């Protein structure tokens, strides 16, 4: 027997309370303004004396509705900034990063292959305790490079206090 209701494992998360409150307020104000605009239109078509006052109040209501929609956006941004959000890169960004890393790996492998054929000093330098870089300066490990590439700009990074 097939189930009638199947829940998703990860649904869309609920809006934070301040953002939800601002969104409900914006929807109510916008809907009242639209109803008011419709009534103002019909009053002006019929030539009623209410057409002018309703039109003026509809213009004011449009300004207030616009402000309320902006308030939702600002409240959302403030909430995110204060409470923090786990940054997940989009699949497009992740795919581009994978492609870039794949190309970099291929370029490094080709460089190693060329260095191996030409008999360069990289192997002797590594044997002497270096990592194959000029000047003996320590290089950042490949794992650290990949970890840095995987982080989004807003991600928090915990480091050892040394």
Image (cartoon, rainbow, N blue to C red):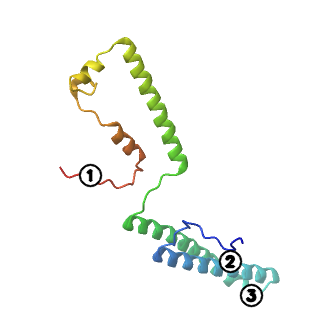
Image: 133 above or below 85: above
Circle 3 — which element?
A: loop
Image coordinates of residue 82 in percent, x first then y, are: 37, 67
* Comparing labels 1 and 3, the label whose residue is closer to the camera: 1
Residue 65 picture quarter: bottom right
Which residue was labeled with disc 1? Answer: 159
Q: Which mark is residue 148?
A: none
- At 42% from the left edge and 65% from the top edge, which residue is drawn? 80
Question: Mark 1 and 3 residues: CB-CB less than 8 Å, in contact?
Answer: no
Image coordinates of residue 61 in percent, x first then y, are: 60, 78
Which residue was labeled with disc 2? Answer: 34
Q: CA distance from mark 1 to mark 3?
A: 71 Å
Residue 130 picture quarter: top left
Q: CA distance from mark 2 to mark 1?
A: 53 Å
- At 28% from the left edge and 24% from the top edge, which residue is drawn? 132
Q: Is residue 37 left or right of residue 132?
A: right
* Comparing labels 3 and 2, the label whose residue is closer to the camera: 2
Q: Earlier in the sequence, mark 3 or mark 2?
A: 2
Image coordinates of residue 29 in percent, x first then y, are: 59, 79
Q: Which mark is residue 49?
A: 3
Instruction: Give the position of the N terminus as an image quadrant.
Output: bottom right
């Amino acid at each position: 027997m097939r189930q009638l209701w199947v829940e998703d494992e990860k649904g869309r998360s609920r809006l934070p309370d301040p953002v939800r409150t601002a969104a409900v307020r914006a929807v109510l104000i916008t809907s009242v303004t639209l109803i008011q605009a419709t009534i103002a239109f019909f009053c002006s078509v019929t030539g009623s004396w209410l057409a002018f006052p309703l039109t003026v109040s509809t213009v004011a209501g449009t300004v207030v509705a616009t402000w309320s929609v902006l308030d939702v956006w600002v409240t959302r941004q403030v909430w995110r900034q204060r409470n923090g959000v786990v940054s997940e890169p989009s699949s497009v960004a992740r795919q581009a990063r994978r492609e870039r890393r794949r190309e970099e790996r291929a370029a490094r492998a080709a460089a190693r292959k060329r260095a191996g054929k030409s008999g360069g000093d990289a192997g002797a330098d590594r044997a002497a305790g270096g990592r194959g870089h000029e000047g003996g300066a320590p290089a950042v490990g490949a794992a650290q490079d990949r970890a840095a590439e995987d982080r989004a700009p807003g991600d928090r990074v915990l480091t050892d206090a040394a």
